[in-house]
Amino acid sequence: MNERDSEAVASLLRARGYAIVEDEALADVILLNTCSVRDLAEQKAIGKAAHLSKRKRRNPRLLVGILGCMAQNRGADLLDRLPDLDLVVGTQKFHRVPDHLDNLLATIKGEGPRPESILDLDAEAGSQNEIRGHDHTEGAPQISAYISIMQGCNMHCTFCIVPKTRGEERSRPIDDIVREAEDLVAHGTREITLLGQIVTSYGRREFPMVDGKTPFVQLLERLHALPQLHRLRFTSPHPSGFKPDLIAAHRDLSKLGEYAHLPVQSGSDRILRAMNRPYTRDTYLRLIASLRAAQPKLWFSTDIIVGFPGETDEDFAATRDLFREVGFEMAYLFKYSTRTGTPAAELPDQVPTDVAEARHRELMDILEKRSLARHQQMVGTTEEVLAQEPAKRPAGRLMGRTRGYRKVFFDAPDRLLGELVQVRITSATVAALHGEVVTNG
Ligand code: SAH
């Protein structure tokens, strides 16, 4: 999400005549786009901003800004802590960055006093429609691109800061999104990932159901019909958003591939209730079963938080058992991070760090064994791979993804970038597959 927001801001700045430099040391303006989901992300951003403030004292013409969730979450307090910041821009104001910079630069040019810091954090109606610009570079198409389809989240999980930083759910019109996708595809994009804090809620209050289908599935169908698009993905969904129409989409829309991300967070009903996750272990497992029935080849991934306040050994055992039972091939495993202002921050029985560490390690071990075993089973099979980008090294090697979204490295010429290629898998590690092209599609 942040990558996409940053890319859209960069696109607006380029359109305004700014140039993006590769080397931070050469920049006249440095903007940090920030995340607040866990404390570590905020600490890193604050550390970086403090470092830049020092540089600014040596070079008063350098402009430094903080954008996004941490700006929204901490607001004016950030300026108290880092008084040298020039710009603090919230999550509904990304598109205002060029105007703010123009104003700051105009003041500096006049050799006047240091410009006043700008703080722009208000909600703005329609801001979800502003993250839409992409830059098309000649010769190097963006094979895999993101489209932001909505902003905000109304789920109110008790651990989560996102409703505070991103506001209420607001969706973009289907036609606008389709136009953005058509433009990307015309410039060589072959995989689109739809983005939102809670994509499965897309348009549920703004747009009607059609033929029993939710706006999200209507959108998927429209995009699936784009002839040159090979793959269609989305993140992040909520398990409760997988209604029959979305389950059927995993059977009927082949471009969705064989992959589903279903953040479960915990396998204990008690903890799920405390997290305000509106499903139980049992309904979650039944959802996995329905998806498997619709599309037997699906690879599943999930998000899990260990160490949520009050999580006992028994609760954790339930999570571990569910984790084993589903057999996730991928997972994002997190240690609970207290977010001030969320309901969970007020709960008693915060779990000691070493206990959370140990639980995290245990799940990591299960995941690594499982991923390796599944990858090794693929050796000798032939997979449809979207050739996405040149591998970092050696030259002549490409990186692509299987229909199950596994990373594959294989030797092939750059002209195959953006193509669906048949690759025979020859070896496997925990993190990736290696293979050779059997036909060049
Ligand atoms: N919208 C998605 C979550 C996106 S945030 C959903 O509702 O499922 C990505 C992940 O970060 C979450 O799924 C959760 O596992 C993790 N996360 C969010 N808040 C957290 C916190 N306070 N501490 C640790 N992990 C957290």
Image (cartoon, grey):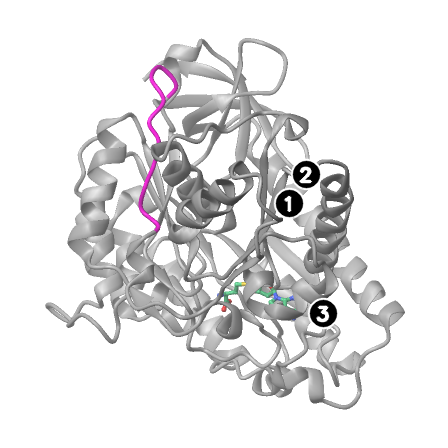
If the picture is divided into quarters, which one holds ligand 1? bottom right
Answer with mark 3 or mark 2, whichever residue precedes in sequence: 3
- Identify the image quadrant of residue 136: top left
Read off the residue under disc 2.
430
The image shows residue 61 at horizontal and vertical percentages of: 63, 37
Q: Which residue is mark 3?
A: 337
Q: Is residue 133 magenta?
A: yes
Asked if the residue at tag 1 contacts the one at tag 2, i.e. Cβ–Cβ closer than 8 Å, the answer is yes
What is the three-letter code of the residue carrying label 2? Val
* First in residue order: circle 2 vs circle 1: 1
Residue shown at 10% from the left, 68% from the top: 211
Which residue is located at x 42 percent, y 62 percent?
A: 237
Q: From this view, report whether residue 112 is shown above or below residue 390.
A: below
For residue 371, the mark is 1
Look at the image and tell me in which quarter the C terminus lies.
top left
- The image shows residue 25 at horizontal and vertical percentages of 68, 28
Q: Secondary structure at mark 3?
A: loop
Horizontal and vertical percent for residue 261?
Answer: 48, 57
Residue positioned most to the right = 354
Q: Which residues are magenta?
A: 131-140
Query: Residue placed at 38% from the left, 37% from the top?
Result: 11
Q: Is residue 301 left or right of residue 420?
A: right
In the image, 379 versus 87, the foreground residue is: 87
